[in-house]
Amino acid sequence: MDYIKNKIIARKIIVLKTIDSTNNYAMEKLRAKNGKITEGTVIITKKQTAGRGQTSNVWESEPGKNLTFSIILYPFFIEPSQQFLFNKAISLGIIDFLKKVFPDADLKIKWPNDIYVGNKKIAGILIENIIKGKEFSCSVAGIGLNVNQMKFNKNISNPVSMKQIGKKNYAIDKCLENLCLQIEKRYLQLKNGSHKKINSDYLDSLFRYKQLHYFRYKNKKINAKITGVSDYGELLLTGENNKKLKCIFKEVDYIL
């Protein structure tokens, strides 16, 4: 597959046999070309040797069984302070795709960037932004989606794949095409200024939203409810005695 007939995403596809990380490759290309890469270019590989998740996390993927790819986009139409909106749009695109495949599944976005089916992780996102001055220059959205993998490393606590849910194999190329289509719809929604819709849909899809659960906050176990996500991407919690908390990445963990 050389291209997909979308307006933006996947008009150009770079297929790599093996690479350490598609995000690394995309960022290197952007630096070498001074940001002049066709918007929507997808870099995809069958074998990613050092896939990365948020901060120091690693994304494990069996070669040829899953989708591991990155999308280069230029969301200059939003302010750098609004960059978590971009994260929301990408997350919702993945949710939209999976809902079409599994309409009855309990699909949620686990803050900040994982996609869950029930209490199991089916996809992860790593977004890296380049900000120049006060302007949004470009973004690389790295996506890992478990498609046909059946066995996972025992050190990974709660993975699940499309095949495990649907009890059948799924065509990788077709999944890429349909996933890119749904992400593009959300990206165009963002571009058209439909921020209220994106924010509303994100909260509707947020894992454990407004539910009382245990979390680990700064190495202490707390009982709290998620009440929202700030414009800057902080997770908002309300704990005991109505205590309000704003949590940044890695400051809080879900206790599943």
Image: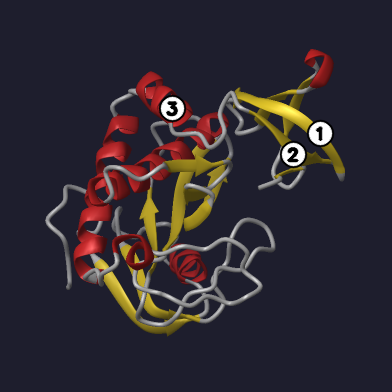
The answer to which quarter of the image holds residue 161 is bottom left
> Which residue is at a point 44% across and 54% down the rendered structure image?
141
Near-viewer residue (56 or 42): 56
> Which residue is at a point 71% across and 45% down the rendered structure image?
255
- CA–CA distance in space, label 1 to label 2: 5 Å
Residue identified by numbered label 3: 204
The answer to which quarter of the image holds residue 225 is top right
Q: Name the N-terminal-most of marks 1 and 2.
A: 2
Residue 108 x/y as whole percent: 46, 41
> Which residue is at a point 61% across and 30% down the rendered structure image?
232
Three-letter amino acid code at the position of disc 2: Phe
Q: Residue furthest top?
A: 242
Quarter of the image containing the N terminus?
A: bottom left
Is residue 246 at least partly visible in the picture?
yes
Q: Name the N-terminal-most of marks 3 and 1.
A: 3
Residue identified by numbered label 2: 215
Residue identified by numbered label 1: 222
Do the residues under discs 1 and 2 have CB atoms within 8 angstroms? yes
Residue 98 x/y as whole percent: 31, 50
